Amino acid sequence: MALRLNPLDIVRCRFPEGHPHGDPTVPSNELHRVLVVRTTQDADGSQWALVVFGTGQNTTNKGGQPCSFNQMEIDALPGTGLTTQTRFHFDKNVGIKVDDAWFPADSAGLARGHVPQLQKPEALRMIDQHLPLQISASPKLAKPGPVQVEIKKKFSMANLRPKLPPSDS
């Protein structure tokens, strides 16, 4: 059975190597904790997920600085699937295909969890503020930014004149 993800799931995946000399379309060898923020499905039934990277390093429990405006920490509570407090970085996000290359079959049973009920409003606010509305169909590191929509209407005088019936002269 194929792994199916839902928004606000916390799972492990092979987050791409995003360093300057690495290929962001290639999964890393290590499994990393990620927060699923959006999901979509292709016409062929393939699922894609927009995920944000999580780390247990430099969390407030370990003496790190408080979270910045684009970070969120989730404690290791029952139901989260986390073994230690984890900081999710909403500026480190990527759209990836939900398949064995990124989500190995053996990781599906590894402590899959969800965002705690009390933190769901904060998580949804962070998603709305920092992440794109759509998941790109290619696994490239996404740069969060504001979504701008511009609507332009052109008016023509030809469209404003009433049409007169032909004259019989």
Image (cartoon, rainbow, N blue to C red):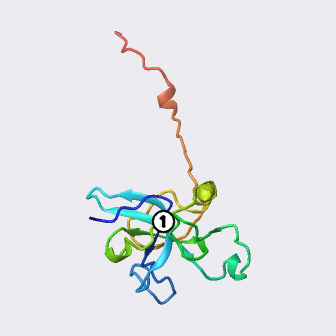
Q: Nearer the viewer, residue 56 or 46?
A: 56
Image coords of residue 128 (percent x, y): 59, 56
Residue 11 seen in the figure? yes
Image coords of residue 13 (percent x, y): 42, 75
User: What residue is shown at x 63% (from left), y 56% (from top)?
Assistant: 118
Q: Nearer the viewer, residue 104 or 135?
A: 104
| Residue 98 found in image quarter | bottom left
User: What residue is shown at x 53% (from left), y 40% (from top)?
Assistant: 153
**Quarter the C terminus occupies:** top left
Using the image, determine if residue 151 lies above or below residue 45: above
Q: Nearer the viewer, residue 78 or 52?
A: 78
Which residue ends up furthest to the bottom in the rendered image?
21
User: What residue is shown at x 42% (from left), y 79% (from top)?
Assistant: 14
**Quarter the N terminus occupies:** bottom left
Q: Secondary structure at mark 1?
A: strand
Using the image, determine if residue 12 lies above or below residue 134: below
Q: Is residue 102 left or right of residue 36?
A: left
Q: Is residue 47 left or right of residue 76?
A: left
Image coords of residue 38 (percent x, y): 47, 59
Count of marks overlaid on the render: 1
Q: What residue would you read off at disc 1?
A: 113
User: What residue is shown at x 51% (from left), y 86% (from top)?
Assistant: 19
Q: Residues within 10 Å of mark 1 (few under 14, many from 20)?
A: some
| Residue 168 found in image quarter | top left
Amino acid, disc 1: Gly
Image coords of residue 54 (percent x, y): 55, 74
Which residue ends up furthest to the top in the rendered image?
168
Residue 128 seen in the figure? no
Q: Is residue 146 left or right of residue 13?
A: right
Using the image, determine if residue 25 lies above or below residue 71: below
Using the image, determine if residue 24 lies above or below residue 163: below
